[in-house]
Image (cartoon, rainbow, N blue to C red):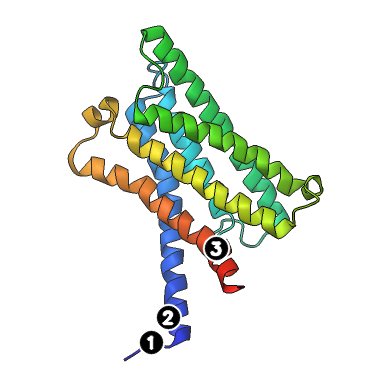
Amino acid sequence: MALTAETESRLYRSLRAAAGAAAHLVALGFPTAVAVLARPGSSLFSWHPLLMALAFSFLMTEALLIFSPETSLLRSFSRKVKVRVHWALQLLALLCALLGLGIITYNKHLNGKPHFATWHGLTGLLAVLYASGQCAGGVLLLYPKLMKNWTLAKLKLYHATSGLVGYLLGCASLMLGMCSLWFTTSVTSVSWYLAMLCPLLTSLVIMNQVSNAYLYRKRSQH
């Protein structure tokens, strides 16, 4: 028997809510697992994976999920409050990413190793630089009068879509980091595949959220 449009819509919202809840758990669980594995404080390098996991897995994911209509932790708050919290979390994510980048750069200098010589290093550098630009662009949404020739709706669209690209870069860097010798010697077999699924899951959830909020809506208006 064919499902009615209302039933399909309800089922779709339920699936999105379940996926969003899973993304919240992964966002917190992944950096927690990285902290256990890295044992921060045991070496200078140990802070790098933790800070990057906090930046791109926890803080940035939660900053984006704030706008989820199904799983936002601030659903009962006004959009103004959500925007302020989003900005604060994104700023914290950028600070963690910059600190993590600085630590690994200095650690490689101390050990006489080449800088940004792997795909993980290059992608990580690009993700941090992109996040810096994205945060700077976010200022235009806080003060839209700075861009008089652009409508607020267009600024939101471009910020959301470019932010999605930056988030995917961060997740790609995390996944490439899990291919490093440090990670693969400690995490093997099924555990490694489960770890790789973490940024993949959050990426799919965020992609769906942004697509539904901006891209699909914009397409339907034409």
Identify residue for label 1: 3
Q: Position of residue 20 (x, y in %)?
A: 45, 59
Element on which disc 3 rests: helix
Query: Residue 49, percent across and down?
Result: 40, 29
x and y percentages locating residue 71 in the rendered image: 52, 61
Of helix, strand and loop, which one carries label 2? helix
- Left or right of 68 on screen, residue 14: left
Nearest the viewer among 170 and 83 is 170
Whether residue 158 is visible to the viewer of this picture, yes or no, is yes
> Which tag, 1 or 3, sits closer to the chain's start?
1
- Along the horizontal axis of the image, is 215 left or right of 107? right
Measuring from the top left, give residue 127's x and y in whole percent. Answer: 49, 35
- Label 3 Cα neighbours within 10 Å, binned few <14 / some 14-19 / many ≥20: some
Establish if 165 lies above or below 40.
Answer: below
Q: Which residue corresponds to the image point at 53% horizontal and 54% vertical from the top-left?
A: 65
Task: Residue under label 2, please give it.
Answer: 8
Name the kind of residue labelled 2 in the image: Glu
Nearer the N terminus, badge 2 or badge 1? 1
Per the model, the C-alpha gap separating discs 2 and 1 is: 6 Å
Q: Is residue 89 left or right of residue 101?
A: right
Measured Cα–Cα span from mark 3 to mark 2: 21 Å
Extreme bottom residue here?
1
The label on residue 215 is 3
Q: Residue 98 vs residue 181: left or right?
A: right
